Image (cartoon, rainbow, N blue to C red):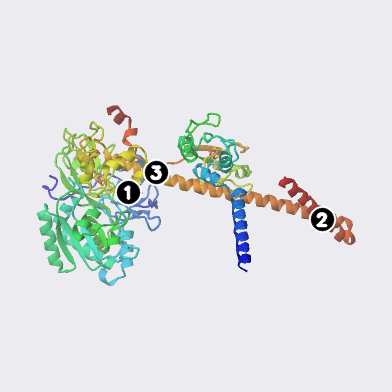
Amino acid sequence: MSTEQPLLRLPLGFEYVLPLLQHEGDPAEPVVAVGERVLRGQVIARAEGYFSLPIHAPTSGTVTAVEPRPIPHPSGLLADCIVIEADGLDEEEQSRPAIENPAAVHPSRLRNRLRECGVAGLGGAAFPTHVKLNPTGERQAEVLIINGAQCEPYISCDDMLLRERADEVIAGVQTMLVALDCPRALVAIEADTPEAMAAVDAAIEASKDERIERVMVPTVYPEGGERQLIQTLLGREVPSGGLPIDVGAICHNVGTALAAWRAIHYGEALTERVVTVTGEGVHQPRNVIARLGTPVADLLSFCGGYTGSAERLIMGGPMMGFALSNDQIPVVKGSTCVLAASDTEVVTEKHAMPCIRCGECAEVCPASLLPQQLYWHARDRDLEEAEAYHLFDCIECGCCDVVCPSHIPLVQYFRAAKTEIWARQQERQKSELARRRYEERQARLAREAEEKKRRLEEKKASLAARKKGDKEVKSEIDAILSRVKARRQQDSGEKGD
Amino acid sequence: MIEAVLTLSGLAAAFGLVLGFAAVRFRTEGNPVADQVDALLPQTQCGQCGFPGCRPYAEAIANGEADINQCPPGGEATITALAGLLDRESKPLNPENGEEAAPTVAVIDEDVCIGCTKCIQACPVDAILGAAKQMHTVIESECTGCDLCIEPCPVDCIDMVPRRQDIGDWQPPFPDEIPQWQNKQ
Ligand code: SF4
Ligand code: SF4
Ligand code: SF4
Ligand code: SF4
């Protein structure tokens, strides 16, 4: 329903809230002070290390705070954010020149540019794109898969983007092929989005690029998941605990391809994205282009505001998304969708019943797991067993939840079990470190005590030597030494007892 | 000739056996049970168990000189793990040793610190940095929260605060730990 309206850009707002962590990896480090004026595209927080991304100002204005604010996260906790008050001028910083001919430069230069521009996976996970375009390991990238299949019902931002800006997406795919040194790309489109398909076909035609091919995939949830897509398109199975590159594939989202193109061709930083605003709780469901940092409330009021049936706000889709505690939470790089859901649209607290071992859940699991077994072990907190049943292969798609006739919140169990295992591993590492430091300290203390004793004895000996004069020195020292020796022997004799 | 060879190899075998037995029977260093116990202790090194650190407590348990319910930082989880390892009944924490509490770390008020180095001497894991007459500071990631530095500080400038929770450390709860879910069952 959100695809009936054209893609529109949200008008400028008054305040933007930019969390320092909007991507997978380490949070960015602020480089602006309160009161400073910033321009659109200016770096306001720099990347900390390779596995991190900078954050850019989404519009021109003044930094009014660097403080903890609510961010889009299932915990509802606060995290550090930079707050910018817009001045309405939307002045842009032009500091990154276009890379005119991407095919002629070294791939590392393209990756650096993507990192400078803060490009992250826009399909939801917000994995830094430069990392994903630099696969390490044995295998070369054989095929680049551009994911135009939505990974959840309701979300349509990729569909809309393809309909309206397919040419830029295809240009992005071409640069990604260069950055990856990869011979071939498949653009996966869902069967029920004919407009997007036509637009992509036209764009590929216009590009005259034979490396790029459009493929159709069935509209079956969770087709948009990487592993499922690779299975469908290539018939290759990504090994448990492995990555797509292990079977020679790399997946990127269509929005990411577009952002990559703009970063390389215009030097444009990632400061906006397409967000689906939908659900029975909003008057005019549609896709909008919103600046990062825009409060969710602005998106909803732009789409006609809440209807009476809005029950809860969800970021992401109905299956894998999470509830937002209020509507002042900002749009971030990974925000695909804001769902103002009525009570029929989300699986709210239904009456959960005991598992009847019907096996429905195993039937639908796209990762071929046995959710029922995982559930029993998670419930008994037998986490080793859960791991043995490949808990970590669960993609948290929620398919098992939906079919379970007993309405058991299976995914919640799996998510909790995974985090518990990670937390225990961290705890173990921490105590391992403490043990090592304790042992090192014990060893050091012993060494120091020994050292002290030795110095004391030397001092005594030399003092005595000075008093008695040189002649007697030698015999005196000998005497002392033999006394010491005797005492030592005696000591060790006592210890031995 | 053949007898000589047989006798000699027989002797060699006999001595080998004796030596092997001695090695097992009269083993002096390393205590595998203590190692296993030590691996389950939280390594806070706080001494609340009545021993000067986790390792000595582990040895005491291995030698049957201490019970398994004396470590407050480890709490119930550690007791359960120890009971499993030693094949014994789990039991509640001995209240004489203290109470299980949320993890903390030490912070030094650097404006008040006089640089006396007393806390450094007390810290079992060398988590405090500083030199004489210079202000000291705690390396947060290495502090085990053992409290041992509080007492020796002459100007009382060390506080224990809850270990900081990053958003990345957040753990979603198990559904059966959410009260409303239990009510519905
Ligand atoms: S959420 Fe359920 S259906 Fe989906 S992968 Fe995990 S176990 Fe399988
Ligand atoms: S679908 Fe639900 S009731 Fe059926 S086996 Fe799976 S967990 Fe049990
Ligand atoms: S009480 Fe303290 S010293 Fe004793 S075992 Fe537990 S953590 Fe280690
Ligand atoms: S800093 Fe204090 S509380 Fe932390 S480990 Fe050292 S002595 Fe214990």
Q: What is the distance, in whole Å, between disc 1 and disc 3 at their CAs?
A: 18 Å
Q: Quadrant of residue A459?
A: bottom right
* Mark 2 residue crowding within 10 angstroms, few (<14) / some (14–19) / many (20+): few
Ligand 2 resides in the quarter of the picture at top left
Q: Which mark, residue B169?
A: 3
**Disc 1 on helix, strand or loop?**
helix
**Disc 2 on helix, strand or loop?**
helix
Q: Which residue is mark 2?
A: A482
Query: Please, which chain is the residue tagged with disc 3 on?
Result: B
Q: Which residue is mark 1?
A: A392
Residue flagged by tag 1: what amino acid is it?
Answer: Phe
**Disc 3 on helix, strand or loop?**
helix
Query: Please, which chain is the residue tagged with disc 1 on?
Result: A
Q: Are marks 2 and 3 in contact (CB under 8 Å)?
A: no
Q: Are marks 1 and 3 in contact (CB under 8 Å)?
A: no
Where residue A233 sits: x, y (%)? 19, 59
